[in-house]
Image: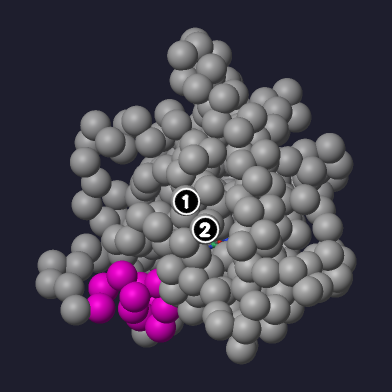
Amino acid sequence: MTTVFSGIQPSGTLTLGNYLGALQHFVGMQEENDCFFCIVDQHAITVPQNKTELRKNIKSLAALYLATGIDPKKSTLFIQSEVPAHAQLAWIMQCVSYIGELERMTQFKDKSAGKTGVSSALLTYPPLMAADILLYSTDIVPVGEDQKQHLELTRNLAERFNQQYNDIFTIPEVQIPKVGARIMSLQDPLKKMSKSDENQKGFISMLDDERTIMKKIKSAVTDSENEVRFDRENKPGVSNLMSILSLSTGDSLASIEQTYNGKNYGEFKQDVAEAVATLLNPIRERHEELMQSDELDEILDQGAEQAQRVSYKMLKKAERAVGLGRKR
Ligand code: TYM
């Protein structure tokens, strides 16, 4: 059976970008694969977090995974810090990583640029991500476009380890969606939609209500042409809204172009907003129910147990390959 692994940081409410680029694709993969979905709280603390907020976000992310359709009977859903093998293997992966290659990661460059007191963990973030993936002999990692570079590094680190020590790690393949791999900000369509955007109008949170969604999409930046056509370079705002509509309804980009031929942006935006609200309303309601129930803790306890079982075996293999501890 093919093994799938992916992770999401609990560093704020997820955006429509997280959903369309990643989460949405996880649900369909559960039927035919052995899936592990992780709440990567140790990655989240590479930048300062408020303790109370982090706790709340961890629980909320677990509820969001379930509300979108992750089924604990089919997939293992767990919190990274509750499975010690992640941090333990991360140390070994750091030992095979070079500082130079870590400094070349665009995420590190973006997050550290112009800052003083940058944590060393921001630099060693990718070896922890490699550990997440390699512990489960993962074949496929579904992610958005922004994680591609981290995945390439994971492959390199795994190959290096296999050559230096013992051939124990599966080399994972990255899976990036054709449409929606990079949902852009509604206010600056040249920038990725991100929950850390200071301009609240730039992103749609997965928990935004219908009115907020309407308002944000209506104020999305477009262009002066009034022509609904997919052209990422010359019409980035409209193209972004088209991707959002396509992923929300299942209609192709070509059929969207046809539908809005001769129509104005007002009508188009109204439909995009309605489609997004239709998509997110049931998720928001289910999330609310789950947050009030005891179900979450049970599911996360079982997920941690299952993940511990699988990951411990691989951790021991890696430690043995390197020569750590005593031979048992
Ligand atoms: P994170 O938490 O930033 O994002 C979670 C997922 O959402 C995708 N994504 C987007 N997709 C499309 N458009 C956007 N605007 C957008 N913004 C985010 C991301 O690509 C990602 O798939 N390092 C990872 C978490 C991680 C991980 C892992 C992922 C830790 N260990 C192991 C896979 C495997 C991250 O920060 O994702």
User: Residue 123 placed where, x, y %?
Assistant: 32, 69
Residue 85 visible within the image: no
Q: Which residue is drawn at 29% across and 49% down?
A: 45
Q: What residue type is labelled 1?
A: Lys
**Crowdedness near tag 2: few (<14), some (14–19) or many (≥20) residues, C-alpha within 10 Å:** some
Q: Is residue 249 magenta?
A: no
Query: Looking at the image, which is closer to me, 101 or 279?
Result: 279
Q: Residue at x 63, y 68 (%)?
A: 265
Q: Residue at x 79, y 43 (%)?
A: 28
Q: Does the magenta stretch include residue 107?
A: yes
- Viewport quadrant of the N terminus: top right
Q: Which residue is drawn at 67% across and 41% down?
A: 279
Question: Which residue reaches farthest top?
Answer: 294
User: On the image, which quarter does residue 58 sit in?
Assistant: top left
Res 215 label: 1
User: On the image, which quarter does residue 321 sit in?
Assistant: bottom right
Q: Give the range drawn in magenta.
A: 102-113
Secondary structure found at label 1: helix
User: Residue 246 placed where, x, y %?
Assistant: 75, 59
Res 281 label: none
Instruction: Report if the CB atoms under discs 2 and 1 are less than 8 Å apart.
Output: yes
Question: Which residue reaches farthest left?
Answer: 116
Secondary structure found at label 2: helix
Q: Relative to 327, is 291 above or below?
A: above
Res 218 label: 2
Q: Is the magenta stretch mostly helix, strand or loop?
A: helix
Residue 114 visible within the image: yes
Q: Which colour scheme is used?
A: one colour
User: Residue 291 placed where, x, y %?
Assistant: 47, 20
Q: Relative to 95, is 245 above or below?
A: above
Ligand 1 near label 1 (Cβ, under 8 Å)?
Answer: no
User: Residue 304 placed where, x, y %?
Assistant: 53, 28
